[in-house]
Image (cartoon, rainbow, N blue to C red):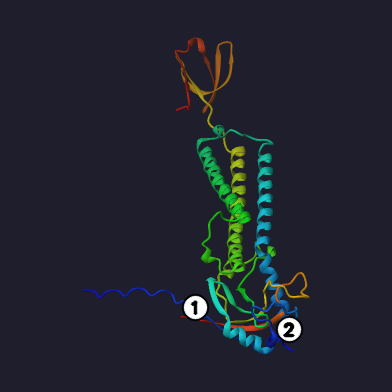
Amino acid sequence: MSPATPPERPAPTPTYRLSPGPGRATIADLRTAQERDRMLRTELARVRAAATAWRNGLGALLVALIGFGLIKGRTDVSQLAPAWAAWVGLLLLLALVLGALGALLLIRAAHGRPAVTEIRALSSIRATDHVEALASTAAMRWGIASTLGCTLILVAAVGATWYGPDRDKPALQVTTPAGTACGSVVRLDHGVLVLKTKAGEIASDLTAASTIVAVPQCP
Amino acid sequence: MADHHNAARPGNPDPLPYREVTDEEYAVIAASQFTVEEPRSGTLILRGPCPRCHTIIDIPVVSGVFRTSRLLGGKLRHRQQAVADHVEPMMCTCEEGHPGRPDDVVGCGAYWTLTLSRQDG
């Protein structure tokens, strides 16, 4: 029987000892303390302002991108080759998720988290504000990264939609006494149908045709 | 000359005038009377009475602060590091009224330094 494993001890909590500083404080120490105090007192407001600016700027960038996407190019994903259409759909889904996440994170950074804080946790307003400022800064950074990622993926999706290969066009399969021809229609002239097949253009006399079948793809 | 011996005591209706003043005894008093809390790694709260005006104050000691210019290039991990041993310049941060205090500052003007030593375990 193996000996019981001793329970893991929790990580030791650091404690801090205070002692007088070396020598007499100088007026430079006071100015440093005043500057740090000023930075801390304004920190949360500065984070909120920066997050609001980033939110507005990235929102404008996305609006501009949507406007750019409307300029020219294919807009119907169903015209793309099936594999490309699937990838574009995946990219659009990813862009939607990243865009929503980025927007939520930037809104959280700009306006805070809607939550009730335990009154016991509010031992120091400035320390609490500092902790909130750090959390908001982290949310802002992730929000910026997510929104930029969304933008890049949207660009990729629009590019793939514009430049991806066409879906195969429906073909006709015509059977005549001379044989069977399958391909896309080139022209119809006086009862003679010209099909573009893998072997080139083939003319078929429709008056002699026994069957004409529309097929999604030639065999 | 420091005026902590004549400092306003609790209940004294006459507030001390604002004076940028220090004394070696300020640091001794603060070191013996201030407590330290760590609400989160990298953020300490030093709390105790100001050695001069005796108002209870709390002074956050943090390892990093938000700056826009460091937003993209800054190291996020930096703020999560524990506050290492160092000398911290401190000042009274009370918001009580002290005649003669400039508009853009807080406190009674007292300042001093403390050495913060981390002791694991």
Nearest to the observer: residue B95 or residue A73: B95
Left or right: residue B8 compared with residue A128: right
Q: In the rendered image, which residue does mark 1 sit on?
A: A14
Q: In this view, does A5 lie above or below B115?
A: above
Left or right: residue A206 compared with residue A159: left
Q: Is residue B49 above or below residue A97?
A: below
Q: What element carries label 2?
A: strand
Residue B43 position in % (x across, y down): 57, 72
Q: Distance between the residues labelled 2 and 1?
A: 33 Å
Q: Which chain carries label 2?
A: B
Residue A75 in sight here = yes
- Residue type at mark 2: give it: Val
| Residue at horizontal 62 percent and vertical 48 percent from the top | A151
* Pointers 2 and 1 within a single chain: no
| Residue at horizontal 60 percent and vertical 59 percent from the top | A136
Residue A86 position in % (x across, y down): 51, 39
Locate the N terminus of chain A and report the quarter of the image it occupies. Answer: bottom left
The quarter of the displayed image where residue A130 is located: bottom right
Residue B44 position in % (x across, y down): 57, 74
Q: Is mark 1 on a helix, strand or loop?
A: loop
Q: In the rendered image, which residue does mark 2 sit on?
A: B21
Residue B121 position in % (x across, y down): 46, 80
